[in-house]
Image (cartoon, helix red, strand yellow):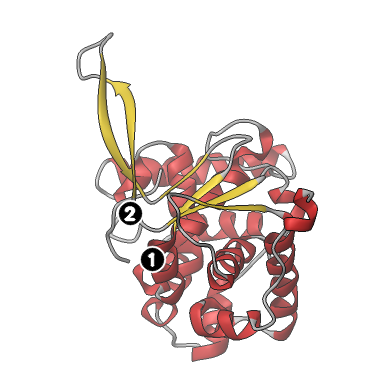
Amino acid sequence: MSWFRRRAALAEDWEQIVERAVAHWAYLDDDERDALAGHIEALVTTKRWEAANGFELTDEIRTVISAQAGLLILGLDLDHYADVGAIIVHPSTMRFRRTSQGSIAGTVVDGDVDLLGEASYQGPVVIAWDSARHSARHPERGHDVVLHEFAHKLDMLDHVVDGTPPLPDAAARQRWVDVCSHELHLLRTGQGGPLLDPYGAADPAEFFAVATEVFFNRPVDVQAHKPELYAVLGAFYRQDPAERVRRRHGATATGAEAGAGADERPS
């Protein structure tokens, strides 16, 4: 049997799954829901899904992860995920043995690393399901492994993992670099405030992924406290999630109503 024939089908009760398990669904208008439905179907049926360590994939797993990934590209298109060949799902935190640079120049250290997710250039997206499921239901935690890893995939579209996704022109790119470099400096020097997870200080690529998480999960707070960062992220994603919150909760809505918490960070 060909791989094409083995591809997953969209669950008949996909909408009930999303309503129950993905908090962002309640904030979308009818047009946005229609667009997300198309992305969910495309991701479920055209991507290769694999379960690790004997884990059994279910309709809920494929639907929820696809909904979270699809949220990122509501203002874009599915071509932005052309490099996503496989989505590999682990039941929980993954432990890998990695080699890293030692504290002494020229040395390396082998050690175990715990990950919630991973994305690599021209490689699969790897997700820990227990984290993805909880984050989809609780955006108030401020981070989501699916948003994080698929943001990395968007960053990789220009073949460089540097925290700057493809932008329409030189002016937009310069604005992005100026704003994100400033916010990264603040985060690294302890002046960034509590909104952005310190994991984002690791490098520009991780900063973009972490900023993406709070842009979608704490949009009112990002707009209020980091308006320039909100503006460049909104221009790239072509979305205004803070407006969705105000539309649902009124003009006085706070970030808590949209959905930070600490957890082990994905790579």
Q: What's the amino acid at mark 1?
A: Gly
* Residues tagged 2 and 1 counted as in contact (Cβ below 8 A): yes
The residue closer to the viewer here, 223 or 79, is 79
Q: Decide: few, some or many residues near mark 2? Use Cα within 10 Å; few <14, some 14-19, many ≥20.
A: many
Can you give x and y, in whole percent of width and height, for residue 228 in the image? Answer: 51, 56
Could you tell me if residue 224 is visible in this image?
no
Q: Which mark is residue 197?
A: 2
- Secondary element at image label 1: loop
Looking at the picture, tell me which residue is in the foreground, 244 or 148: 148
Q: Amino acid at mark 2?
A: Asp
Which of 44 and 234 lies nearest the eye of the viewer? 44
Q: Is residue 247 visible?
A: yes
Mark drawn on residue 142? 1
Up the image or down, 251 lies above or below 156; here it is below
Q: In the figure, residue 78 lies in which quadrant? A: bottom right
Task: Establish if 220 lies above or below 222.
Answer: below
Residue 79, how many percent across, how many down? 76, 50
Residue 250 percent across, percent down from the top left: 51, 91
